[in-house]
Amino acid sequence: MFEFEVLHKDEKTRARAGLLHTPHGCVKTPIFMPVGTAATVKGLTIDQLHALNSQIILANTYHLYLRPGHMLIAQAGGLHKFMNCDLPILTDSGGFQIFSLADTLELHEEGVSFKSILDGSSHFWSPEDNMQIAQDIGADIVMQLDQCTPYPAEKTFVQDAVTLSANWARRCKAAHTRTDQALFGIVQGGVFLDLRMQSIEMLGEIDFDGYGIGGYSVGEPHEIMFETLGEVCSALPQDKPHYLMGVGNPTTLVQAVALGVDMFDCVLPTRTGRMGCAFSHEGRMRLKNAKYKDDFSPLDPLCSCDVCKNYSRAYIRHLVVSGEMLGGILLSMHNIAFLQNLMTQAKEHIAAGTYDKFLRDWMNSPAANDY
């Protein structure tokens, strides 16, 4: 029920366009996945996500486990029925959320103890527990439990995390029994290329349906990420999808596709939208700025989304400065559409063999250095 096909490869870069088959439909890659952490992409309906050309969305095991609870979601018939979603869904393991709360956790070979961000209650997850929760929630794609390391971090600490994550990966694979659900491993190793290669070798021996690339975008400059990302993508199995986790910067997406990344997710388009910011080919637009007060042009004249067709910068600025929730909703819609359209262009250029030109044109555009 899960298959990945590479349909086109760009000869001058490592970009590739593919087709990801899931029980809830096919996904054309490269693709950006909007984040619906708590079973909702904030402020948007599933119909709106369809209209924005979203093919797959992401939810989070940690948050859904805490509220409303994985057993309630299972009782509802799974996450798709619970949230009335006909799109494919990927759920993160929750490892990043747990390890971002480093002062509240205890790490063991057996698993991780942590406290709820809701009420301070104590919880323990083994890899087996994590897989059972993921299977109860019922997304199309789930991720192994891993240890995500911060930046900066000592190499010995990162080495231990790579080893622990690989051990947990084996246990996750053994515990995962749903045949209608794909399981991805997660590459760790921080900024250390030799540790990244070690992680890939250990995960390859286990053999997953796809591979997340974790431990980037955790505070390091993106230039440092790009020092190793290309080698990581080249070393991963080429017949499996490559998922760069937690990245949604338009320029980073365009660059990472050229290195062989197929999937992305991030809260950036919706979070910045709620903060009054819009993506555009001119760069990031901060709608609170007074210069937009009487600007009746669309957010981005090059964008064909419904927001740009129907609303002006002046109107959206009015909503933002007035604290009207519609402002954040419209900006979230536009920002998601912007990234989806960017990925659609990427697919078209990969198929045409012109991705290198697309990359150069973007990197020479006004927007390239403004995200």
Image (cartoon, rainbow, N blue to C red):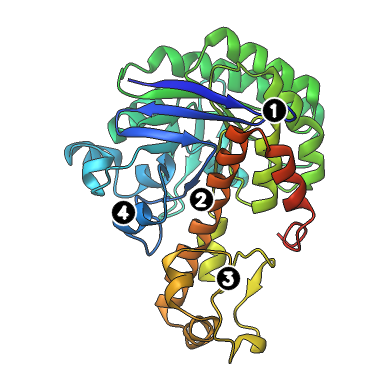
In the picture, the disc for residue 105 is none
Image mark for residue 14: 1
Residue at horizontal 53 percent and vertical 10 percent from the top: 206
Which of labels 4 and 1 is toward the front? 1
Residue 155 position within the rendered picture, expressed as x and y whole percent measured from the top left:
81, 28
Counting residues from the N terminus, which is met first, the one under dot 4 or under dot 1?
1
Read off the residue under disc 4. Answer: 46
Residue, x 60% and y 16% (percent of image)? 237
What's the CA distance linking mark 4 and mark 2? 15 Å
Q: Position of residue 167 (x, y in %)?
A: 57, 15
Q: In this figure, which residue is indicated by the disc labeled 2?
A: 340
Estimate the x, y position of residue 240 in percent, counting from the top left.
Answer: 53, 20
Image position of 104 with respect to 269: above or below: above
Q: Of marks 4 and 3, which one's residue comes earlier in the chain?
A: 4
Considering the numbered disc 3 on the image, is that residue within a helix, a strand or a loop?
Answer: loop
Residue in the picture at 45% in, 15% down: 173
Callout 1 amino acid? Arg
The alpha-carbon separation of the residues under discs 4 and 1 comes to 33 Å
Q: Comparing marks 4 and 3, which lies closer to the viewer? A: 3
Task: List the residue tagged with mark 3.
Answer: 301
Numbered-mark total: 4
Circle nearer the viewer, 4 or 2: 2
Dot 2: what SS? helix
Label 3 packing within 10 angstroms: few (<14), some (14-19), many (20+): few
Mark 2 nearby-residue class (10 Å; few <14, some 14–19, many ≥20): many
Q: Are marks 1 and 2 in contact (CB under 8 Å)?
A: no
Q: Amino acid at mark 4?
A: Ile
Q: CA distance from mark 1 to mark 2?
A: 20 Å
For mark 1, give the secondary structure. loop
Q: Position of residue 90 (x, y in %)?
A: 41, 37
